[in-house]
Image: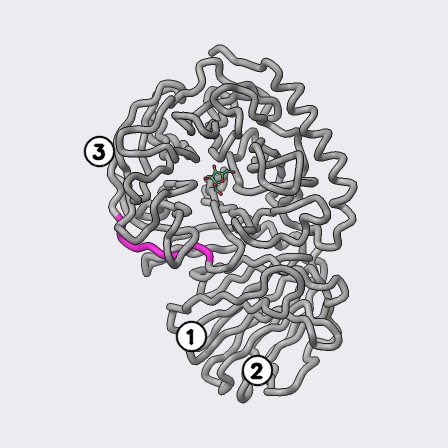
């Protein structure tokens, strides 16, 4: 295979240097996250190329190394031995070819013949074709060279359009498959290709498409087996009430078609988009998403950085046909202390149940007994200021049967709230919360609910409390772990 490295090494060096300079400013920001994946500085969006290679976990990401705004996309790179402690690596891809000169857009990674292959979208503005699929290869998992024969898919298929991006590749039996996001006539689609060698691709047709209400173009499709079925994830553009979907169904490798059974929004937080999954050597299906959103205000830009990833989550298919998301168990390593409470009766209007606990990096697991809670809304107050002017609420609305995250008094940044319906009928509700310096991720309803939000409180707003509106609520159990 002929590889092409002309000028690439020098561009990568310049990009790393620019990030190094901006990092001096970024590190002064009190909102730099402590245990989430971020670049050292400047802009990042989608996670790309998630893979375990030679025993180590790799995460690449969409990266603009020259400013804290989106720009010509590079691929940033980090690795980890345990999904908890991450190490920065040199930037892996820079746009430098006729077919990717305006950006190395999102894509995926696979191992083939002991080498690490990146399959990504080359993007060129005001050009036809605007988006093509490309390959880059590495022997050591750090230094990548672009394939001389790029692009490996040089034009969109008849069923697609100019928006033709974000290849996700996997192996089934002895063949490689690639799903690419596109849309035609305002119908979002995932189109399928197959290959024996990752270089020569055969078009197999439309694997799945919008049912009419699932958006006009499907960004970042991902397809994988989960339990007895398959799951297709995509981030549809212009879908009315969802940003990222998971669709449970079945893929027939014979007909090359995916049939939909159930779909819903994957994460109901305000800051979640373009996730990707991979399978690790323990057989787990792990998902990481971009923990921000297009168009949102990002206050950290004034410190020369923008964007982060969610915590890695393990996915499972439940008996009711829905997917559960659980933060990977390795995250328990971050716990450095434990506060525990049982049978705590929380009354309306009373406060300071947890006055000993303060912090901006906490894991909290609280379970309320619903049969012994008369209150209409009860839960947690996080990142509270002493004067009560700042707080982020995570609570259960018992009337609407919804988990709510309300950051309207959360500090800087867009002030809004979001909610998710609880579907399991249970006589208790558990809220599992990960709080970092500028994020809050909430899991509930047996993993059926995940909500990711960025928040930008004053660094001094560090209080935590439990609360109940209109009556009392019984906390069956509460654990708070300050995190490293
Ligand atoms: C999704 C996305 C992808 C594209 C990338 C560009 O957030 O728009 O479709 O490849 O970002 O950075």
Q: Say if residue 110 shows up in the picture.
A: no
Q: How many marks?
A: 3
Q: CA distance from mark 2 to mark 3?
A: 55 Å
Of 411 and 353, nearer the camera is: 411
**Residue 473 coordinates in the image, percent (x, y):** 54, 83
Q: Is residue 134 magenta?
A: no
The residue that label 3 is drawn on is: 254
Q: Say if residue 470 shows up in the picture.
A: yes
Q: Is residue 265 magenta?
A: yes
Q: Which stretch did the figure color magenta?
A: 260-267
**Residue 240 coordinates in the image, percent (x, y):** 37, 57
Image point (56%, 51%), residue name: 292
The mark nearer the N terminus, 2 or 3, is 3
The mark nearer the N terminus, 1 or 2, is 1
- Locate residue 421: give its quadrant: bottom left
**Residue 127 coordinates in the image, percent (x, y):** 43, 26
- Ligand 1 under 8 Å from disc 2 Cβ: no
């Amino acid at each position: 295979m002929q590889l092409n490295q002309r000028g690439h090494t020098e561009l990568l060096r310049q990009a790393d240097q620019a990030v190094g300079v901006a990092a001096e400013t970024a590190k002064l920001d009190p909102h730099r996250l402590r245990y989430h994946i971020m670049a050292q500085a400047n802009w990042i969006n989608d996670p790309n190329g998630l893979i375990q290679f030679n025993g180590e976990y790799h995460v690449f990401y969409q990266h603009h190394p020259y400013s804290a705004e989106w720009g010509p996309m590079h691929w940033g790179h980090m690795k980890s031995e345990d999904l908890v402690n991450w190490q920065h690596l040199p930037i892996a891809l820079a746009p430098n070819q006729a077919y990717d000169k305006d950006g190395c857009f999102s894509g995926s990674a696979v191992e083939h013949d002991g080498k690490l292959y990146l399959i990504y979208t080359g993007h060129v503005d005001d050009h036809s074709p605007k988006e093509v699929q490309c390959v880059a290869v590495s022997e050591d998992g750090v230094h990548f060279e672009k394939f001389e024969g790029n692009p490996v898919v040089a034009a969109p298929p008849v069923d697609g359009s100019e928006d033709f991006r974000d290849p996700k590749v996997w192996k089934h039996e002895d063949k490689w498959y690639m799903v690419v996001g596109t849309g035609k006539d305002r119908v979002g689609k995932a189109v399928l290709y197959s290959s024996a060698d990752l270089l020569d691709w055969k078009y197999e047709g439309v694997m799945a498409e919008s049912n009419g209400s699932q958006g006009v173009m499907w960004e970042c499709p991902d397809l994988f087996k989960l339990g007895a079925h398959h799951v297709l994830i995509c981030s549809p553009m212009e879908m009315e009430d969802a940003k990222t979907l998971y669709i449970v169904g079945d893929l027939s490798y014979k007909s090359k078609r995916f049939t939909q059974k159930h779909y819903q929004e994957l994460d109901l937080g305000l800051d979640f988009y373009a996730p990707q999954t991979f399978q690790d050597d323990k057989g787990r299906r792990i998902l990481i998403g971009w923990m921000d959103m297009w168009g949102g205000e990002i206050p950290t830009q004034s410190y020369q950085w923008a964007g982060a990833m969610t915590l890695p989550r393990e996915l499972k298919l439940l008996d009711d046909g829905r997917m559960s998301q659980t933060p990977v168990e390795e995250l328990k390593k971050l716990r450095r202390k434990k506060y525990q409470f049982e049978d705590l009766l929380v009354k309306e209007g009373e406060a300071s149940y947890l006055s000993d606990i303060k912090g901006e990096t906490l894991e909290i697991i609280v379970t309320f007994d619903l049969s012994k809670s008369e209150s209409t809304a009860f839960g947690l107050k996080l990142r509270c200021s002493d004067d009560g002017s700042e707080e982020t609420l995570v609570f259960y609305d018992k009337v609407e049967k919804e988990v709510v995250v309300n950051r309207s008094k959360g500090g800087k940044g867009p002030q809004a709230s979001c909610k998710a319906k609880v579907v399991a009928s249970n006589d208790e509700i558990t809220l599992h919360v990960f709080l970092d310096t500028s994020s809050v991720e909430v899991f509930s309803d047996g993993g059926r609910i995940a909500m990711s939000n960025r928040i930008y409180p004053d660094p001094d707003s560090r209080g935590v409390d439990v609360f109940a509106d209109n009556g009392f609520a019984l906390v069956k159990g509460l654990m708070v772990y300050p995190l490293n």
